């Protein structure tokens, strides 16, 4: 009897293992339709100069959208927006025609002496006879530069970063800086809330990230009901900061040292004639998100969304920014993953849940396409189980030159522990990449979690994963071209997204959200 029971149990487990192996074999079969040579063929097309850098609202972007639609259609995917493959969204652009900054009648040069970030799209003139120096521009219970200071309608000047006490930062109490150092918008938003007319932040150097804020073709969604007071923020060199502080007989090193040594705030009223002028040309137009759909079976009302952005920087000074990695690599991965799922469905192995493939436009202009979708979702966020976002997965960054089989994973555990475990399990079972969580740390100074389209899903409590290879020497340069892509590595990373997606759409239970973001989102 005991032998008989043991035999039955052994047969049961053999059956289970056989099922698992057969299921894995099925998944691998469709994953293997994602091929390096097909990714390469797609990428050499959309990242070619014929597509003019795919700038949002330009002819190259529209040509790219048509290419994506044709590819999705050929793979058998249905239109994802009520019979259309497109979701149009209205835009307004601001092209600077003249930028001037004068201090006591001396002119300073944009990108050499200062940079700026302004939300107003009209011509702007800021003219003041005085500037308020306000330490680090921090408003915190441990240290408050704004205490008993009225900055309403004033232009304020602040240091970058935050105070230190010895080797430790005053606000965090350890060697890691607080968000006041990491996120410049925290200082900008605080000055805005306090009523300041603008803020000038003294930087040791004007980094590429700061300079990139000055776009020759800035855009925003053209939504009449979305009005708010404009933000005026300027980033100035240490030399220019010292020119201002010298009018109060001090300098940046002296005030920084005094604050650090005493832990007390410092403020000065600087008598100075300053004038800032920005003149712009305004254009109204539209752009497109592309939506392609695979309907699920018994759980079809639940939707998994896979995204990338197909726009890039366009043409500047006659040179094409091809954007092969950013984000041609993510866009062509969507095409191949979509084809794999469509083939599975045609052979009777389609997903239980539905899948929306959505290449966005407007990402390079401030996540505009995904922001519009988040305000006008075609599929309810209540029915959206997760978003897997692919933005740059075709290259190797400097940190992994000796270990290229990796991918950065960002945000996987922020809203759902299950999602995090599913992605790790998919990697353990199939792709075996090194999953690098460096940029997933809450104090990551790069703030990549907030810088791609997935964030407009996370704001609505949709669990997300951002797949990323990190920046490299060709990031946002004309040299980001198709021949520099590692296509075998691109294939492996795309397969990881596929394996994770397969589990999400076919598992019995929908993944659980175990952390809910507050309604006040952090930008």
Image (cartoon, rainbow, N blue to C red):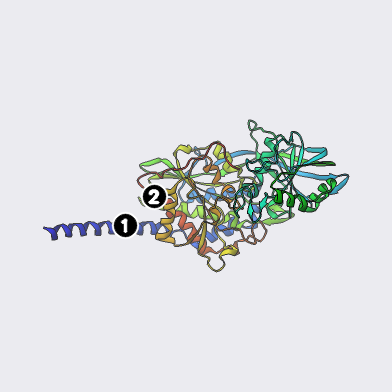
> Mark 2 — residue?
345
Image quarter in which the N terminus is found: bottom left
**Extreme top residue here?**
225
Which of label 2 and label 1 is nearer to you? 1
Q: Name the residue located 73 percent from the left edge and 51 percent from the top edge.
A: 256
**Label 2 crowding class (10 Å Cα cut-off): few <14, some 14-19, many 20+?**
some
Tell me, yes or no, if residue 168 can be seen here: yes
Q: How many marks?
A: 2
Q: Which badge, 2 or 1, is on the more N-terminal residue?
A: 1
Residue 253 versus residue 7: which sits nearer the camera?
Answer: 253
Residue under pointer 1:
20
Secondary structure under the numbered disc 1 in the rendered image: helix
Residue 109 in sight here: no
Q: Position of residue 265 (x, y in %)?
A: 72, 44
Whole-percent x and y of residue 449?
56, 49
In depth, the one of 453 and 320 nearer the eye is 453
Which residue occupies 66% across, 40% down? 139
Query: In the shown orientation, is residue 401 left or right of residue 23?
Result: right
Farthest residue, direction left: 1
Callout 1 crowding tier (Cα within 10 Å): few <14, some 14–19, many ≥20: few
Separation of residues labelled 2 and 1 (CA atoms): 20 Å
Position of residue 264 in the picture relative to residue 98 (left or right): left
Closer to the camera, 29 or 246? 246
Residue plotted at (68% across, 42% down): 188
Percent of width and height locating residue 318: 73, 55
Which residue shows up at 56% across the image and 54% down it? 439
Q: In this orientation, which residue lies closer to the viewer: 326 or 177?
A: 177
Q: Give how far across and how far down residue 51 sits, in percent.
A: 63, 53
């Amino acid at each position: 009897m005991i032998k008989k029971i043991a035999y039955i149990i052994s047969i049961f487990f053999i059956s289970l293992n056989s099922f698992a192996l057969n299921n894995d074999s099925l998944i691998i079969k469709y994953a293997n339709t994602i091929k390096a040579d097909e990714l390469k063929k797609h990428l050499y097309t959309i990242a070619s100069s014929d597509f003019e850098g795919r700038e949002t609202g330009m002819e190259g972007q529209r040509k790219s959208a048509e290419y994506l639609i044709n590819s999705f259609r050929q793979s058998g995917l249905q239109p994802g927006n009520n019979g259309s493959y497109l979701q149009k969204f209205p835009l307004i652009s601001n092209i600077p025609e003249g930028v001037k900054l004068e201090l006591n009648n001396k002119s300073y040069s944009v990108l050499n002496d200062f940079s700026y970030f302004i939300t107003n799209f009209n011509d702007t003139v800021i003219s003041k006879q005085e500037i308020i120096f306000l330490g680090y521009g921090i408003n915190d219970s441990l240290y408050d530069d704004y205490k008993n200071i009225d900055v309403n309608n004033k232009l304020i000047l602040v240091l970058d970063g935050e105070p230190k006490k010895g080797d430790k930062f005053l606000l965090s109490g350890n060697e890691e800086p607080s968000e006041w150092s990491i996120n410049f918008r925290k200082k900008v938003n605080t000055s805005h809330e306090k009523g300041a007319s603008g803020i000038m932040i003294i930087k040791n150097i004007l980094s590429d990230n700061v300079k990139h804020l000055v776009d020759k073709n800035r855009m925003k969604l053209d939504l009449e009901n979305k009005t708010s007071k404009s933000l005026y923020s300027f980033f100035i060199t240490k030399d220019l900061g010292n020119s201002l502080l010298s009018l109060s007989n001090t300098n940046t090193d002296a005030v920084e040292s005094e604050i650090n040594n005493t832990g007390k705030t410092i403020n000065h009223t600087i008598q100075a004639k300053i004038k800032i002028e920005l003149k712009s040309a305004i254009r109204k137009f539209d752009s497109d998100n592309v939506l392609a759909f695979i309907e699920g079976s018994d759980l079809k009302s639940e939707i998994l969304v896979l995204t990338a952005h197909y726009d890039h920087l366009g043409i500047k000074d006659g040179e094409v920014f091809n954007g092969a990695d950013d984000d041609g690599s993510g866009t062509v991965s969507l095409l191949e993953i979509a084809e794999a799922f469509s083939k599975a469905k045609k052979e009777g192995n389609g997903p239980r849940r539905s899948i929306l493939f959505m290449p966005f436009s407007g990402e390079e202009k401030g996540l505009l396409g995904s922001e519009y979708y988040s305000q006008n979702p075609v599929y309810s966020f209540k029915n959206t189980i997760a978003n897997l976002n692919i933005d740059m997965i075709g290259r190797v960054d400097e940190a992994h030159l000796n270990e290229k089989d990796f991918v950065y994973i960002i945000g996987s555990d922020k809203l759902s522990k299950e999602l995090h475990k599913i992605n790790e399990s998919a990697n353990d079972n199939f792709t075996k990449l090194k999953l690098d969580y460096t940029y997933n740390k809450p104090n990551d100074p790069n703030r990549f979690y907030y810088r791609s389209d997935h964030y407009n899903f996370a704001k609505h409590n949709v669990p997300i994963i951002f797949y990323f290879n990190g920046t490299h020497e060709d990031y946002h340069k004309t040299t980001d071209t198709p021949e520099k892509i590692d296509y075998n590595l691109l294939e492996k990373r795309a397969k990881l997204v596929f394996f994770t997606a397969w589990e999400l759409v076919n598992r019995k239970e929908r993944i659980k959200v175990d952390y809910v973001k507050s309604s006040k989102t952090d930008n």
